[in-house]
Amino acid sequence: MSLVIENLHAKIEDTEILKGVSLEIPKGEVHAIMGPNGSGKSTLSKILAGHEDYEVTAGTATMDGEDLLEMEVDERSRAGLFLAFQYPSEVPGVSNANFLRAARQARLPKGEEIDAVKFYHEMYEKMDVLEMDRKFTARAVNEGFSGGEKKRNEILQMMMLDPKYCLLDETDSGLDIDALKVVAKGVNAMRSPDRGFLLITHYQRLLDYIQPDHVHVMADGKIVRSGGKELALELEEQGYEFLKEVAAA
Amino acid sequence: MSAVLEQEKVKFPDWYEKRRSEAQAEFDKLDWPTRKDENWRFGSYKEGYLGDAQIVHGGEPMNLPAPAIKDSVRFIFFNNELVKTEGEVPEGVIAGPMSEVFEKAGDCIAKILPPLQGRLGSPKLAAMHRAKSEGGMAISINGAVDKVIEVVHVVAGEGATVLPQILLVAMEGAKGRVVERFVNADAEEAVTVVSVSDLIAFGQSELRYLVSQELNQKSRFIRLADSKLEKSAKVKAGSILTGARWAREETYSTVDGEEGSSEILSVAIPASGQEYDQRTFQHHGAAHTGSDLLFKNTLFGNGKTVFSGLIFVDEGAHYTDAYQTCRNLFMSDEAEANSMPGLEINADQVKCSHGSTSARVSDEEIYYLCSRGIDPNSARRMVAQGFSAEVVEKLEDEELEEFAFGRIDAKFEEVSS
């Protein structure tokens, strides 16, 4: 049972961004992708989540054997994929609680209604883990939230939707160290043999708090190196200089 | 017109009959709207022609709707004739058909009854209404009244024109809430409704007044609304436009007493084949007055809106705070919104702003909601509901908000199905 990406190529308008990405994330594992700006890391997560700006030109992506690329955006989510956005959208006038409720309701069979009492109880419990004030339930989704609040809100959604595979796109960016610890606590609480994670990050810092099983380096639309968590430390020390050698080779 | 029977003429006091005959003379002198009429710019002026109207009053009541608000006191009119009252009229409220209320309190009413309406483009229709309408609802509120007063106009008769009316008076220090609804008895009948509402809020009164236009999409709706606020009166007047093929509202708000403040709110949701035309005037006649207009239109299919608004601050009405905002959200590329905001300030130390925006529903917002498993239709609906929510929440009244959201949700449900 894995999220499997094979030889994935994708473009936006005429620019090819992914040039053959292959990666397997089995359940129970945490993988991290690092790499310089513009290497295609965020694009990979957006394509997996079905963003319509990108066109897949070759390759496959499957989730537990199901063809992810054939599914609509909402179907992917209901099938168990979750993307924590780098820049989450604001949705004015839609309260956080109503949004989460609608997302949970969408997972129920037709005709079945969500148990509101249980739902709120669960939401409050998870908000406590993330040290979120209860007033966030009534506020419009991400509207006027600080960068850190938005990221916590992403993790709250992830916790409430109980996905099989979680993609976290630069969740650490814009977070101070305290917020980072809280977010990491939320992610770590969700680690389980039934769930796979893909963390996309620029910095090793996040990986101090969420220990990955595997680290991959992406450059120019491809995975150019893979290794254990020590690879992240190496990158932190040496930067991405070695990529020039890879490119030259 | 089989469902509609001509009823016996309603008896009015002499002073009112005199007004009616004066209105008839006025009607004869005035012209119907034309293409060149500035007050009908971008609008469908031909819809404002009612020269061949078959005016009906009363009839055999049928298909009266269920209460919209729990525990309200309800007055149901069928073709502008009161046919049913439900719930006990609360203490402090005098309410009933205009002819009866005029009989009881004629002199007082005569003094406060506002001048002829239609200053925003439809003087002829206003004159027609006064000359031909057989009354309507009169409500006077004294003291703080908890119960919502619900006035429902059920209209019937293929090709008929109905002339409902409401006179709403909040006495000094009074507090109350009124909901007025317009519905058809028959989903297939094309009915024209020309409704007049006069609202007078005396000193320190606080009034919430919500109008819901729920007619079928064959019908036509015109509403001429006038309000006058005295010292420290606070009025929130809102309208929810979801029905009718074509609807026009002319809203004239006058704040004449210091510290008076008027909120004018609207949510309009035209779908394909529907056109809503709203003209407003925020008139400040005294210093230290406030008005705040917020209109939000969500347009589906080839739905069309027209908004024309003017803030007018009289000489001497210093320290006025007046705001006017009209926002359009396009749910399709075929929809059309026309906005003409305006300001005229003749006083000092005034804070005024006006603005209008139009935007297409954001693909990023829809994508974000879908990425959480919400299907695209529901996601679009949530965004549109969220857009309207700001207006509804300004009512600051749980029961009225629940009713308004119910109407808005029903319309979105209808549009997306």
Image (cartoon, rainbow, N blue to C red):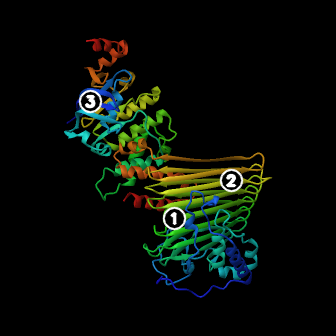
Q: Position of residue A33 (x, y in %)?
A: 31, 25
Discs 1, 3: same chain:
no
Which class describes the residues within 10 Å of circle 2: few (<14), some (14-19), or many (20+)?
A: many
**Camera-side residue of A218 and B47:** B47
**Disc number lying in front (1 or 2):** 1
Residue B151 in the image: x percent, y percent?
56, 72
Which of the chains bears the disc numbered 3? Answer: A
C-alpha span from label 2 to label 3 = 57 Å
Asked if one can make out residue B236 in the rendered structure from this viewpoint, the answer is: no
User: In this orientation, which residue lies closer to the viewer: A190 or B235?
Assistant: B235
Q: CA distance from mark 1 to mark 3?
A: 51 Å
Q: Which residue is mark 3?
A: A9
Residue identifier under label 1: B246
Tell whether A61 sits left or right of A178.
left
Task: Same chain for labels 2 and 3? Say yes or no.
Answer: no
Where is the C terminus of chain A found, in terms of image quarters?
top left
The answer to which quarter of the image holds residue A39 is: top left
Inspect the image, locate mark 2, and give the three-letter code of the amino acid beneath it.
Ile
Q: Point out the image quarter for the N terminus of chain A.
A: top left
**Seen in the image, is A152 located left or right of residue B286?**
left
Check disc 3 and report its element: helix, strand or loop: strand
Q: Position of residue B296 (x, y in %)?
A: 54, 53
Considering only vertical position in the picture, is B305 above or below B181? Answer: above
Say whether mark 2 and mark 1 are on the same chain.
yes
Residue located beneath label 2 in the image: B311
**Would you say B122 lies left or right of A103 here?**
right
Task: Name the chain under label 2.
Answer: B
Q: In the rendering, at what x and y percent does residue B329 appear?
A: 49, 50
Residue B115 figure quarter: bottom right
